[in-house]
Amino acid sequence: LQNVPVEDGLAGWYYDEAFTREFIPGGNILTENVTLYAKWEEGDSPFSYEVLADGTVKLLSYTGGGSSVSVPETLDGKPVSAIGEMAFAGQRDLQLVELPASVETLDGSAFLGAVSLENIKISEENPNFLEKNGVLFNASGKTLVAFPGARGGHYAVPAGTTEIGKYAFTNCRRLRSVTLPTSDLILGKSVFSGCESLLAIDLSGVKEIPEL
């Protein structure tokens, strides 16, 4: 490698996409062809996070605005493993959120206040979650984790669902009716709080009824 391109905003060249093994121009002797990855300096990031004990990060907030956001798999080279409480709170124009394969946990309150949210997408390579028609479930499909706040009309919770997580339907103001599976079902905290248009819901199959 004779010349390494240098441009404004270029932070350096690395051997890996996670930017953990830096290539030092003039300090590395190459005997074969290699692929290098350019790391660019970023401006103020719309994502704030905290570093966890295992070196991964938890997303604390998103302030970028807009109608859609794709959460990156890494932030500053650290895998995004968790989506924290109220992470997208107040993002009133947000209609689509895409989550990466690296996410392992997501707080049920993450999307509270995202009143225009219509779809939650998750990478097909994520081993911890899946989405069914824009609704987020855990990997087994047995726990409904988050329902988009802008959805209205009627929703039938899929058969086989055994739990609806805390805040899953909170503030879904356009939702008018929900059909629940007839088998024993566990409901999380405040699961239907703020659903001001909700007219009908049959709780006869619910095993545990918390404060709704």
Image (spheres, grey):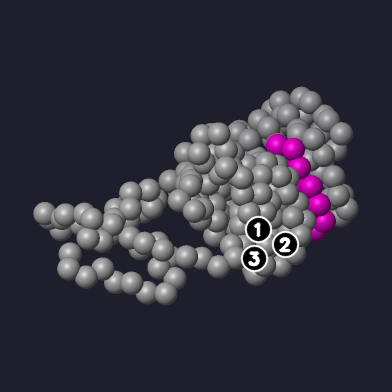
How far apart marks 3 and 1 lie (CA) works out to 6 Å
Q: Marks 1 and 3: in contact by CB < 8 Å? A: yes
Secondary element at tag 2: loop
Q: Indicate the secondary structure of the residue bearing disc 3.
A: loop
- Tell me the distance, in whole angstroms, between the alpha carbons under discs 2 and 1: 8 Å
**Of the image marks 3 and 2, the number of the one nearer the N terminus:** 3
Residue under pointer 1 = 62
Q: Is residue 171 magenta?
A: yes
Residue matched to label 2: 91
- In the displayed structure, 151 sits above or below 53; it is below
| Residue closest to the eye, 102 or 24 | 24
Q: At label 1, which amino acid type do we have?
A: Tyr
For the residues labelled 2 and 1, say whether their Cβ atoms are less than 8 Å apart.
Answer: yes
Residue 149 visible? The answer is: no
Which residue is located at x 55 percent, y 34 percent?
Answer: 53
Helix, strand or loop at mark 1:
strand
Q: Is residue 40 left or right of residue 62?
A: left
What span is colored magenta in the figure?
165-174
Classify 10 Å Cα crowding around label 1: few (below 14), some (14-19), many (20 and above).
Answer: some
Which residue carries the number 3 mark?
A: 64
Left or right, 46 with reference to 103:
right
Quick check: is 97 in the magenta stretch?
Answer: no
Provide residue 148's location: percent of width, then percent of height.
Answer: 69, 54
- Report whether 6 appears left or right of 68: left
Residue at image coords 26%, 61%: 25
Observer-side mark, 2 or 1, equals: 1
Task: Give amino acid for label 3.
Answer: Gly
Q: Is residue 22 visible?
A: yes
